[in-house]
Structures are given as C-alpha cells and as structure tokens.
Amino acid sequence: MISTSSPLTQARLQRRTLLQSTAALGLLGLAGCATSSIPTRAKVVVIGGGYGGATAAKYVRMFSDYKIDVVLIEPQDAFMSCPLSNLVLSGGKQLADITVPYTALGRRHGITVVKDTARAIDTQRKTVTLAGGATIGYDKLVVSPGVELMMDGIEGLRAAHASGQILQAWKAGAETVALRRQLVAMPDGGVFAISVPEAPYRCPPGPYERASVVAGYFKAFKPRSKVLILDANPDVTSKGALFKKVWAEQYKGMVEYRGQHKTVAVDAKEGVIKFEIQDDVKAQVLNVLPPMRAGSIAVQAGLNNQGNNRWCGVNFLNFESLVAKDVHVLGDSIQIAPVMPKSGHMANSHGKVAAAAIVAELAGWEINPAPMLTNTCYSFVDNKNVVHVASVHEYVAAEKTFKAVAGAGGLSPAPNELEGVYAFNWASNIWADTLL
Amino acid sequence: MKKNALGLALCLGAGLWALACVAQAQTAAQVPTTQPMLYVKSLAATCANCHGTDGRAVEGSQVVSLAGLDKNHLVTQMKAFKAGTRPATVMHQISKGYSDSQIDTIATYFAAQKK
C-alpha cells in the first residue's frame, strides 16, 4: 500500500480537505480533475451532464452491471438545478443550495467525466470532437444538451444580454444570482416584467412560478412594486387556474397577466419591451425569455429535423434520433410526444429509458417493448407553498409514441405547505438519482 | 495558473481513490442483469426520481425509501392509493398509471433491495 508520506497520499488528503471546504460553498472547481486523460473511444459517450445526460450515464453503468464504459462530456464544474432556481430569485435559496458536484459519477460509478464542450459530431465515423481538440469514438452516443436560447429571435436582445442589462436566468447559474441582484437593487414601486416565449419552451410552468415567487419577495420587502407577465401564448400554458387564483388572491393588485403579447424587440437603455401588436411596456427589471430550440450541438449535428427544425425527432422506444443511427437524444432537445413537458423530471425519465435500450442493444437483446415515464413538477407560489402537476406516460406501439395513461396524473387542489416540504425532498432525491 | 497546476497534481491521487470506490459500487450489483431483469429494473427506475435510486431515498427524506419494504405492504399501499382509500398529495394520481401486474413487479423488486 501507499505510505502516509507518499506524494499520492498527500495529494489525496489535500484534495479531500479541498473538497470538504469547497463542498461547504457548494461550488466545486475540481470536477474537471477526472479529465487528466481523455479516452480515444468509449462504448457510450454522453454529451451534457444535466437531468437527462447524467442520468443516462449513471444508469448505463448500473444497468450493465458496470461493464459498459461511459464518458460524460460537460463544460460546467458542477450541476446547477433549474428546478428550485426561482427560489434564488425570491431569496429563499442560495445558488449553493441547488448545486451538486459531478465527482460521484466518477468515484462511485466509474464514469469518465470530461470537463469540456462537444464541438462537433461525426455521425458517419461515430466520433465526437471537443473544444479542447480531443476526439472520442463511440458505439452509442447520447446527446442531451438542453435548450439553446434563440437570442436573435428578439431584436436587440443579444446585445442587451451580453451587456448584462436584460438577463434570462433560464439556465441556472451566475445569471440567476445577477437577476436576484437586479431585483434587490430595484426601488420599491418598480415593475419586474417577464416575457414568456411561445410554447414549446423549457419548463412550461417556470415563468409563472418565477412571477409568483418574485411577487412573494415584493410583498414582503417592496410592497408597492409590481410583476407583469407578458405571454406570447394566448393563456397560461401550465397550472393556469391554480396560478391565476394565487395572483388574484395572494398577490391582488401586484401581479398582472397579459396573454397574446409576443415580444419582438427590446430597448435595454430605455427599459422597454416591444410587441408584435400591443403598445410598448416599460419596466425597471426586464426578464426576456426568447424562443428556444434544441441545444446547439444537436443543431450543429443536424439532429433538429422536426418542429420547424427547432427540435430533434426521436424513436420513442429507445430515444434514437430519426436521422442518425446510434445517436440518442434526450431531454429538452427532443420533439415532444403529446402532453410531455420539457422538464428535469421528464429528462431524468428519458435518461433511464434510453440507458436500458442502449444496454439491451449492446447486449444484443430486444429493447423493452413497453417503456414507461413519469413526471412530477412542483411549482412554488411563494417560498413555502407549492402546487404540482403529475403524469404517467406509456409507450403505445401502434402509434410509436408515449401517451399519458388515461385516468392517471393530475394537479394539486390548491397551494399547500406539505407539498412545499415534498418539493424540497423531491429535489434532494432526484439530484441523488441523477448524480450520486 | 496556480489552480491548474494544483489540479494536475491532485488528479494523480484521485485515480486510485476512484478505482477503490468503483469496486465498491460494483459489488452492490450482486445478481447479473439478464434481459427480463433489465425490463424490471427499467420499470422500477420510474419510481427512483422521487424515492431514490433502487428505492433508497437520501438520508432524512420525507419521501419514503422503498428498498427492503415488505412486498405485501408495498402492493397494499399502491392499491390503497389507487382506490383513494389512502390520502395522498400525488401518489393517488401516479399509482393509477400502473397496472396491478406492474405494481406486483415493482413491489417484488423493491422488497428484494437492501435497505
């Protein structure tokens, strides 16, 4: 064994100490440590360490009894959860509370985590090239890059975003904290305007949850302030009746909802949002969510064959791309089945179905002909009270798609604290199921 | 620069540690995963999002761990959720998505898992 004075042991102890101190902050700068040697090929390569990709990576290892080698490519140091990130805006949580390191995927599950960005996929030669220059060959590729925010879909937004004036904070991280700062700096009596893109977009109830919890913050600390929801859709796209009741009762006179408001341009200097039809709106804090499409690597690889070429069509039995063999697309990037939300819970569910199919195919077995998916989505209406929507989805072979099981699923009757407790427990358990 | 140099040095140590931990995880898979078992695991995994991988919820979770619970208890609870005789926030809605045969399969799987 190694003597206690060996440099290896010292390094290990030093690393542990560092891990402990950085874990307290919830920010791990050393996750890229596993990348010291990048393999030239792997049976399974996964692009994207979110709810979909990380789950697929872990479950390929588990379902194969740890026999299939997996490389996970992820540019971020640590996972930061989009679910619960609205509570960072309201002040109910810190970014560290919703941050989970990638280290366990390597240590516990033997996944090679490469801290890098996938730059190109060659679906003929079956290789992925990374920004850092390395090329990795694969037998099976999982593409789970989330969404790309189409900044150019709204005039002036790219520049306003780059300057930090108009934020999205739709991908949890530094921007979430920056938007929180804007809300804290806003004088009482100000207006927070959130612009919602046409569906489909990541996390259907997310904008309405955000509006609600920000209103909760205003109610406690800036009671003369207002929240304005400017929605490109004709009506609230998820949990509509529940949210509207909250806005009418809990946040009376504070939250205003305007449907059919499609944002076409922004003027960051004046703090103005411009619409296709209606008059301009001026606000002190602007949160403009542009239209979304499949993550850029999926588009770059030409996997975006459906939904006006914004989303990737898949065979729902194994999540294999309809245009590239042995490439499986998961999560928010896919063209959804009926009533399938673009959610973290759903991406985790995709990851497991794809992992089982990949393991079966590599073993030469028939793919499970009857996969199932679940979704449970909790939305906070303030820092404690929650409403949910839940569904169960079964693969229907005759229609080659997933359909919600009739009679199953449903909504909360009203916001309640008990589900607030369960929502936090849901988060802890799904983060562990995905990453630990 | 300093951080990069440190990172490289630390990687050397992490390699051995990683090997030990992987070995530990691998011993957890006692029974080889056959084709029918893969389908069972895939079905049971639909519970793991909330109840934890292999039914082991995180410490202190108020969403219950399913691993190692009595099979009959699991089946009875799921049927009570389905029938609406056990009050719930979400399980009365989720349970209705599973057939009695699927519930039997899931319950058998979780009952066999270590707590």
Image: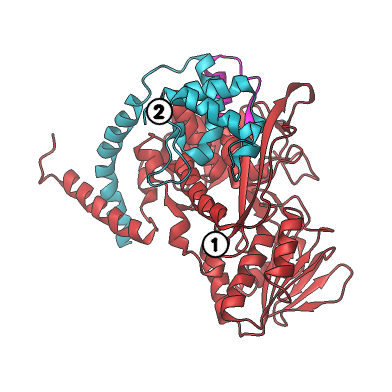
Chain colours: A red, B cyan
Give percent across and percent down for residue A337.
74, 37
Q: Which residue is at 41% across, 43% downward?
A: B58
Judge if badges 2 and 1 mark residues of a common chain.
no
Task: Kindly indicate the quadrant of the structure image that contains residue B23.
Answer: top left
Residue A327 forms part of the magenta stretch = no
Q: Is mark 2 on a helix, strand or loop?
A: loop
Q: Which chain carries label 2?
A: B
Query: Along the line of sight, which residue is nearer the eye, A135 or A224?
Result: A224
Q: Which residue is at 24% across, 43% downward?
A: B13
Q: Is residue A415 above or below residue A359?
A: below
The amino acid type found where label 2 is placed reads Gly
Distance between mark 2 and mark 1 Cα atoms: 32 Å
Q: Visible in this render: residue A294?
A: yes
The amino acid type found where label 1 is placed reads Lys
Task: Kindly indicate the quadrant of the structure image that contains residue A321.
Answer: top right
Tell me the magenta residue range: A352-372
Give percent across and percent down for residue A273.
77, 74
Q: Which residue is at 56% across, 80% downward?
A: A221
Which residue lies under the disc numbered 1?
A: A384
Q: In this view, does A261 lie above or below A337?
A: below
Give percent across and percent down for residue A226.
69, 77
Q: Visible in this render: residue A144?
A: no
Task: Kindly indicate the quadrant of the structure image that contains residue A432.
Answer: top left
Which residue lies under the disc numbered 2?
A: B68
